[in-house]
Amino acid sequence: MIRFIINPSAGKHKNLKTLEKDIKKIFPQAEIIYTKYAGHAKELALEAAQKNYKTTVAVGGDGTINEVTQGLVNSQTALGIIPCGSGNGFARLIKMPLKDNLKCLEIIKQNNTKKIDVGLANNEYFLNVAGFGLDAIVAHKFATSKRRGKLPYFKIGVTEFFNFHAEKYDLIFDDGKKIEITPLCAAFANGTQYGSNFFIAPEAKLDDGFLDMVLIKPTNIFKMLLGLPNFLKDGLSPVKLTETQKVKSVKIIGKEPFYYHIDGEPRKTQNSLEIAIQSKSLTIILSEG
């Protein structure tokens, strides 16, 4: 049995009737359910996993995919993806077509599956990237904005960069080592990119049992602009903005409440954040290309 969980509010749905028609053409017996509220996708995915569905397909952006993941980790039900969001970071990573629903459906039908790692951030799963600092604040501001798309996100990012004040955090690793950091951003990457081909951790692997911890130190706007090309393709600029190391788990302690994000979805914690990797705990369907 296969269930399609569709977020009707996701950014790039032009015609939901056509999408339904395409699904029924490839999967005549498929269940098609639209989400009605925040958290609904997780409930629907968890139900499908408990009923031992073969596949559950998330149709939406990174937030919808994350919600469906919450219900499928450590189950026998595979995750399929039809990307319809703005950034589509994870879909890009596994080479799912971004503008061809029929091709996505054909890939899902081929059922080329793989076991991958999943991250944990304060007991919530993430597929791609979690983190705190400037990117988490931008995610929070964007989530509360009425405008969608890349340009509003970019404008918020620029504004918050100039307003940002770096705070100190203690990091305690699983081997007991402790360091203090004052980052612009701290990302914990299972996948390689945030979305829109902005690569925060180009060497990250989905099945290596580690997260890539990427630290970006505060800097001036000129150095930031000079270093930005490296996020599009490593080596384009001699200005290095990041430090990266492999981690399995780390506890972050701040001096006051702070924002963090999981796959771009904002969260807030009192003063601590626990990050860990859960090795090969999710089955996904991916393109062989």
Image (spheres, helix red, strand yellow):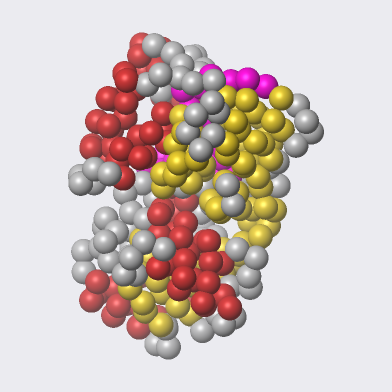
Q: In the picture shown, does residue 261 fall above or below 8?
A: above
> Can you tell which quarter of the image residue 75 is in?
bottom right
Q: Nearer the viewer, residue 107 or 69?
A: 69
Whole-percent x, y for residue 154 in the image = 28, 33
Q: Nearer the viewer, residue 83 or 71?
A: 71
Whole-percent x, y for residue 193 in the image = 48, 40
Residue drawn where x is 26% and y is 57% of the image:
12
Q: In the picture shown, does residue 167 fall above or below 36?
A: above
Q: Is residue 55 in sight in this rendering?
A: no
Residue drawn where x is 63% and y is 56% of the image:
116
Q: Which residues are magenta?
A: 179-200
Whole-percent x, y for residue 179 in the image = 67, 22
Looking at this view, name the residue that lies furthest to the right.
Answer: 175
Q: Is residue 197 a member of the stretch shown in magenta?
A: yes
Tally of marks:
0
> Can you tell which quarter of the image residue 248 is in?
top right
Residue drawn where x is 21% and y is 64% of the image:
14
Direction from residue 54 to residue 100 in the image, left or right:
left
Direction from residue 280 to residue 272 in the image, left or right:
left
Q: In the picture shown, does residue 224 fall above or below 73?
A: above
> Can you tell which quarter of the image residue 176 is in?
top right
